[in-house]
Amino acid sequence: MTAPRPCALVAELTYRCALRCGYCSNPLDRTKRHDALRTDDWTCVLTEAEALGVMQVTLTGGEPLLRDDLETIVAHGRRLELYQTLITSGLPLTRNAVLHRANLDHMPEIVALAEDRDAERLEPARTRYLGRALANRKSLLPDRAQIGRASATAAEARARLEGRMEMLFVLPDYFTGKPKACMGGWAQRLIVVGPVGTALPCHGAHALPLPWGNVRDRELGAI
């Protein structure tokens, strides 16, 4: 049986950030985790990822705009013809669309904002309960009725905007009896590489006491 080949890479370029959001999923000890990967390390990671069959790269953090070499990294990904997305706070913007109990009922306004900006794709980001968000989960976790209303809004928008804007809203596992496989199965769809170079099979794996590989020591394919 052929081993699965991940099609996506999450590149956590830095844990640095000017914000202290209560729903942040970065490690709580992030101040101890410095940016160990240099520009050529990241370009090497992208090259190795593309060779593995990766087609999509998500550039995230922390705040990736704090990396002085972000343009160089993006340019290299473009040369490799990788589809790249950037996750940023957008400072000094004042709006944030990470969904949780306090703002999930604003889904209609979020959809309307995307329409007004002629967005081609809308994927409202749900809170990942890791790091600070895990510690604050009691105040962040939506109730079942909120999930139902948001799902109905997403379904209406998907049907109404078909051909104009792609609407992606993944139902969470909060109220299901059996959770889905993490990220579709460990490292089967994506790989996460953090600022210190650790390659992980999912976003939260760093919390587990396992010997993860590092891209400074081994090629991504070998890991």
Image: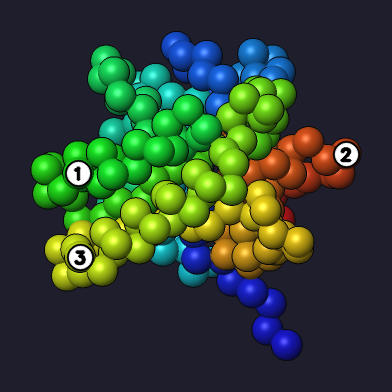
Query: Residue 209's mark?
Result: 2
Tell me, yes or no, if residue 103 can be seen here.
yes
Please count the marks in the image.
Answer: 3
The span from disc 3 to disc 2 (Cα, nearest Å) is 47 Å
Q: Amino acid at mark 3?
A: Arg
Q: Secondary structure at mark 1?
A: helix
The span from disc 1 to disc 3 (Cα, nearest Å) is 12 Å
Query: Residue 160's mark?
Result: 3
Q: Residue at x 45, y 11 (%)?
A: 18
Q: Secondary structure at mark 2?
A: loop
8 above or below 117?
Answer: below
Q: Amino acid at mark 1?
A: Ala
Q: Residue at x 48, y 28 (%)?
A: 102
- 154 and 84: which one is in front? 154
Tell me which numbered mark, 1 or 3, is placed earlier along the sequence. Answer: 1
Query: Residue 112's mark?
Result: 1
